Image: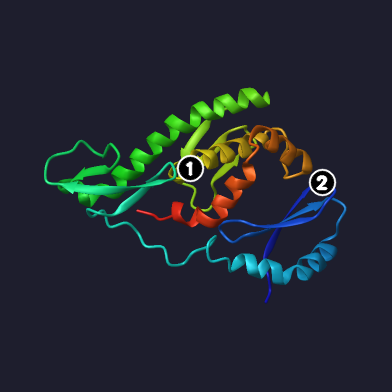
Amino acid sequence: MHIEYVIKYSNRKTFSITVERDRQVVVHSPKNLSEEKIKQLVDSKRELIQQKLNHVQKYPTNISAKEFVSGESLMFLGKSYQLLVVEAEVDGIQFNKEFKISKNDQSVANELFKKWYKKRALEIILPLANEYAENLGVKFSECKISEMKYRWGSCTTKNNINFNWRIIKAPLFVIKYIIVHELIHLIEANHTATFWNILSIQVPDYQRAKDWLKNNGHLLEVDF
C-alpha cells in the first residue's frame, strides 16, 4: 500500500516519522537526506506506520455524538458528571457536581456546552500557561482556545500557543503536560533529547500524561 507523507527538513541529526491525529504521516528529516533515501526509510517502516494509522483508540470510528438527555454523562477535568434536563428555566449551563440545562435549551445544547467548555478552558489554561512560561523563561504572544479537531495544541511561528478546547475534559495533570509541551516548542522546535529533558524537569510525570492520552484521548473527542 502506498503511503502519502510530507517531509519537514530541519537541522536535526536524526530521522523520525510521526502520524498526526488527522492521519497525516510526517517525516522529520535532516537537511542532507535525499528524497530517495527518505522514501527508502519510509518504506522500511511501512508496517509500523500502518499499525499507527489503524490504531483504534487514537483514531476511533465508532464515537457517538451526545444527545443531551437526562442521565447522559459529560467529562470535565478527568471526571464524568451526569446531565440533568429540567423543566425550569436555567441560564445556559449550570454546573455543581452535575450539569443542568433547561428542556427549552436542548435544541441548542451543542452550542451552549461548547461555549461553556471554551470559557472554562481559558480560565484554567491561561494562568497555567503564564506560570509555566515564567518557569521556562519564555514569552508567548497569545494563548487561544479554539476548535482543533486533530491536535491537542500547537505553537505558531508568531509565538502564539493554541489549545483544543476539548482538553479541558482531561485530568489536570494531562492539561499541564499539553501546555508545557507547546511552551517548550518556543525553545526547541523539534522533539529532540533537549526537548524531552526540559519537559521532564517541568512535568516529571509527563509519561503518565502521554499514556493517559494514548488510552483515553478518544473520549475527549466525543463531539456535540
Q: Percent from the top left, x then y, of residue 174?
A: 54, 42
- Up-down: is 212 above or below 116? below
Residue at image coords 85%, 48%:
13
Q: CA distance from mark 2 to mark 1?
A: 33 Å
Quick one: which residue is furthest to the right in this view? 32
Q: The disc labelled 1 sits on which kind of residue? A: Pro
- Up-down: is 1 above or below 126? below
Residue at image coords 54%, 57%:
215
Which dot marks residue 204?
Answer: none
Apparent side of residue 87 relative to residue 110 in the rendered image (left or right): left
Q: Percent from the top left, x then y, of residue 96?
A: 28, 36
Q: Is residue 138 visible?
A: no
Observer-nearest of 47 and 1 = 47
Q: Which residue is mark 1?
A: 171
Q: Residues within 10 Å of mark 2 (few under 14, many from 20)?
A: some
Residue at image coords 57%, 41%:
178
Badge 2 marks a residue whose secondary structure is: loop
The picture quadrant where one finds residue 64 is bottom left
Observer-nearest of 133 and 6 = 133
Q: Residues within 10 Å of mark 1 (few under 14, many from 20)?
A: some
Labels 2 and 1: the sequence-earlier one: 2
Observer-nearest of 210 and 5 = 210
Q: Percent from the top left, x then y, of residue 187?
A: 71, 33
Badge 1 marks a residue whose secondary structure is: loop
Q: The disc labelled 2 sits on which kind of residue? A: Arg
Q: Which residue is mark 2?
A: 12
Number of callouts in the render?
2
Q: Which corner quadrant holds the N terminus?
A: bottom right
